[in-house]
Amino acid sequence: MNITKALASFDALWSPRIVATVNDYDIRVTKVKGEHLWHSHPETDEFFMVVEGELDIALRDRTVHLGPGDVFVVPRGVEHKPSSAHGAQILLVEPSGTSTVGDPLEEVPDHVDATTGHALRLP
């Protein structure tokens, strides 16, 4: 699987595609722009890697800024809100079946796809 080709195969924002599964974990790629929502994942950590662009992950006590090649793990149960002012392409690692909105702390906005990931369909 080529990550660049996978990301080029769809346009939807905040709507991850599953590029691989390792044991019980999904490797997902997604495009983001704007704000996600405050949420947490009480049962699991969440791994973020920026492929392209810049991503901010707001935590209750600070904001983590990530650029291309940067990684960050949000520990289980920690409230966070990802955002990207100009857009980013990211890779996520989380247990299969994990919802993109976890345990939401606010209403899920229309532009956020509440999903456990979509199968990748390459042309």
Image (cartoon, rainbow, N blue to C red):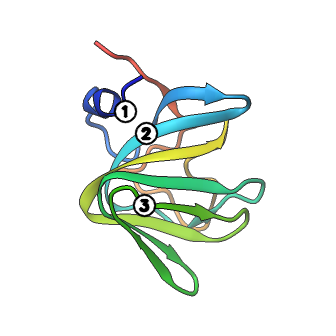
Tell me: 117 left or right of 22: left
Residue type at numbered disc 1: Ile
| Residue tagged 2 | 29
Residue 74 in picture, x, y percent from top left:
61, 64
| Residue tagged 1 | 3
Residue type at numbered disc 2: Val
Residue 56 in picture, x, y percent from top left:
40, 70
Q: Is residue 68 above or below residue 105?
A: above
In front of the other: label 2 or label 1? 1
Residue type at numbered disc 3: Asp
Residue located at (33% from left, 16% from top): 122
Tell me: 31 left or right of 42: left
Residue located at (33% from left, 57% from top): 68
Whether pointer 2 and pointer 1 mark residues with C-beta atoms closer than 8 Å, the reply is yes
Among the 4 quarters of the image, the one containing residue 8? top left
| Residue tagged 3 | 70
